Amino acid sequence: MQAIDSWLKENGITEVECLVADFTGIARGKIMPASKFMKERGIRLPESVALQSVTGDYVEDELYDKLVDPSEIDMRLHPDEAAMYLVPWALEPTAQIIHDTYDKQGQPTELCPRNLLKKVMALYDAKGWVPVVAPELEFYLTKPSDDPDLPLEPPVGRSGRQESGRQSFSIDATNEYDPLFEDVYDYCEAMDLDVDTLIHEEGTAQMEINFLHGSPVNLADQVFLFKRVVREAALKHNVRATFMAKPVEDQPGSSMHVHQSLLDSKTGKNIFSNEDGSMSELFLSYIAGLQKYIPYTMPLFAPNVNSYRRFLPDTSAPVNVEWGEDNRTVALRVPDSDAEARRIENRLAGADANPYLALAGTLLCGYMGIEEGLKPSKPVSGSAYHLRDRAVPVNLEHALEKMEGCEAMKARLGEKFISAYVAVKRAEYENFKRVISSWEREYLLLSV
């Protein structure tokens, strides 16, 4: 705690936000004066926080009592000295510190997404391998709206007009929101977030930010906090930012592509490449692991009902787990690069995915492919949209069934985590099924 105390004093911090990410990726925790934070040397939260859905509901009582102590004991939260950030939009000097969660015996809790990613990282560490990732995160800017039944509209830009039509890679269309993005970059600089390129994506007022490559835990922290950054900057300019996977009808969905490679911890060399620059057998097995196990981990990449609206042919999103070189129609793309930068890009994860769980999922699938010595299918050249042999689940219900029935995933991720995660997502799905949509009222009300 000495390093934390020094950092708080150096930055004149008077208030601390103690954060953990739940299954959805929502920041939960407590806010307290810096003096009280240091005096308590950590905080506690009810274990039940882990079982709260995005709607605020909990899993059914019988399962709830199996997954958490019936007396609703507290988790111990320990601040991570490597995850201390300023809150540049706050009115007074404020820090946000990401915490890890532990039980009474000092063991990492199984239901914490950050702990799960660290668990996967330990597998690589035992092999002497260092995973390196670089996420690319897409999102939409929209006009404020207080009616969820109304379609979202693009916001008004500096010109006083709304964006019309698709403006892929347009500099001028991006400049329409310059004041907002200047704040985004200022906030990121104050927080030492490693954001790189900003581009206008295919959708109307859809943007993408790329992160510099680095450690998976650190990058997951950054994506988790970056969502807060964009939302706060948008609010300041009377705009809304959404990371929903498919927020706008007839527009492309928003993804979180994850570039990943492996380094030898001793030599620092990329072990996805042989000495002659060709693809290593380890690299091919990694791809094969992604192909075999992604269909059983889809709820980590596509966690919501809305997530599956992305996966339609010819809509800039994959519909299967095919792979190919420099091919954007497949889920597993090998970008054109030299041997030192060889990597695989997982294009399945949505922007709505919890970054800790999405990174844990993709790294674990690849690891299991190496461990089992799997061989991938033949790479695809040309469009992969019509291929159905290795299709991904078409909806959340199907995806949860596959995850729940995968013994290999239960062994790796823990049966308690699988049970809890599936139960929370099913609770959300049951909540969704109670809602009558505008489509049903439009086409069925007076026609059937």
Image (cartoon, grey):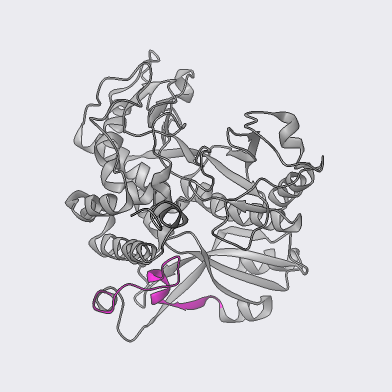
Tell me residue 38's x, y (percent): 62, 76
Q: Residue at x 60, y 38 (%)?
A: 208
- Within the image, what quadrant is residue 281 found in? top left
Q: Residue at x 65, y 69 (%)?
A: 5
Q: Nearer the viewer, residue 12 or 443?
A: 443
Magenta region? 41-63
All told, the count of numbered labels is: 0
Do we see residue 195 in this rendering? yes
Residue furthest top as drawn? 276
Tell me residue 445's x, y (percent): 40, 58
Tell me residue 377's x, y (percent): 24, 24
Left or right: where does residue 84 sit relative to residue 306? right
Q: Residue at x 29, y 26 (%)?
A: 387
Left or right: where does residue 89 sit relative to residue 62? right
Residue furthest right as drawn? 159
Q: Nearer the viewer, residue 352 or 110?
A: 352
Tell me residue 410's x, y (percent): 22, 55
Q: Quadrant of the C terminus?
A: bottom left
**Residue 11 on the magenta segment:** no
Q: Residue at x 74, y 61 (%)?
A: 89
- Within the image, what quadrant is residue 107 found in? bottom left
Do we see residue 1 in this rendering? no
Q: Is residue 86 above or below residue 389?
A: below
Q: Nearer the viewer, residue 41 or 181?
A: 181
Left or right: where does residue 359 sit relative to residue 175? left
Q: Quadrant of the N terminus?
A: bottom right
Q: Is residue 427 above or below residue 374?
A: below
**Residue 59 on the magenta segment:** yes
- Within the image, what quadrant is residue 210 found in? top right
